[in-house]
Amino acid sequence: MASRAVLVLSILCGCGSGGGFPDAKPKGDANDPPPGTFRVAWSLVDLQNNTIDCAKVSAISVTGTMRSPEIAGGSTQVFSCQSGNGASQSIIPGNWAIDWDLSCGLGTISTAPRTEVLIESGKAADLAPLTFQVDTTGGLALHFNTNKAGGTCGPTASGGGGITGTTITLVHAPGGVCEPVTLAIAAGATRPASSYVVDCTTPVDAGCIENDQAITASGLASGAYQIHIRGSQAAASCWTNDDMFSVPPAGKVLTRTLNLGFATGTPGCTP
């Protein structure tokens, strides 16, 4: 006997809720008509209505959460953002309302207006194109760590990293274009608050940044970056990090601890 159970897909990012629908009528039996489908396309724009691609905002999926006053249960249709369009799985014929979410790894970053559609048996409905408007800026909240028991700035004789100076550069990836952002360095238990202006041509020395000091920035253009951190002991560059990460959109903040690697065997560097 054919089942009218509705398939519900799950994904990493959050998806929306239909909400506001009356109690649905019970599902039918094996005499139900064949299902229908829909086709839909979408685009992304920034707050100035310039077209952007999914990678710019790390968007993973477009999710349509479906509810019907005529049918028990619901259906979640999930599409890859990068595809730009998609066809749904089989849907029970009837009147449906679809709420749309655009998601990244940190959750929903935009929504599109609700779609009302009649799904007809054996037919594919063409929906009006969707437009997701996304704030293409986000933030960072970083910590640097040498994983030394005596801290990042403590002397090596006391089990610390022995760092006396730090430089930071931040570049877009790919391309390597410098991002001249001002980083706020919060006070720690032993060191005062300060700020740091990234200069990729002539990086300035920030002194030592202890592992309990948060390094933050807001209003950064979303997308992929590579950071270059150099921690020195006197004149020798002894600690490094060249991690890559993506700044999320929609004002969301990427929080991460960046572990510094020791340059074993480098003259002037004491472990």
Image: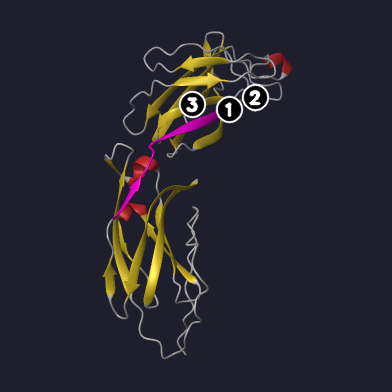
Residue assigned mark 1: 143
Residue 76: mark in rendering: none
Residue assigned mark 3: 217
Q: Is residue 90 shown to the viewer in this render?
A: no
Q: Quadrant of the C terminus?
A: top right
Q: Amino acid at mark 1?
A: His
Determine contact: label 1, label 3, CB under 8 Å. Answer: no
Viewer-closest of 184 and 264: 184
Which badge, 2 or 1, comes first in the chain's sequence? 1
Q: Percent from the top left, x then y, of residue 246?
A: 44, 37
Residue assigned mark 2: 212
SS at circle 3: strand
Disc 3 to disc 2, how far (Cα)? 16 Å
Q: Amino acid at mark 3?
A: Ala
Q: Main secondary structure of the magenta part?
A: strand
Which residue sits at x=38%, y=37%?
Answer: 136
SS at circle 2: loop
Q: Which residues are drawn in magenta? A: 130-142
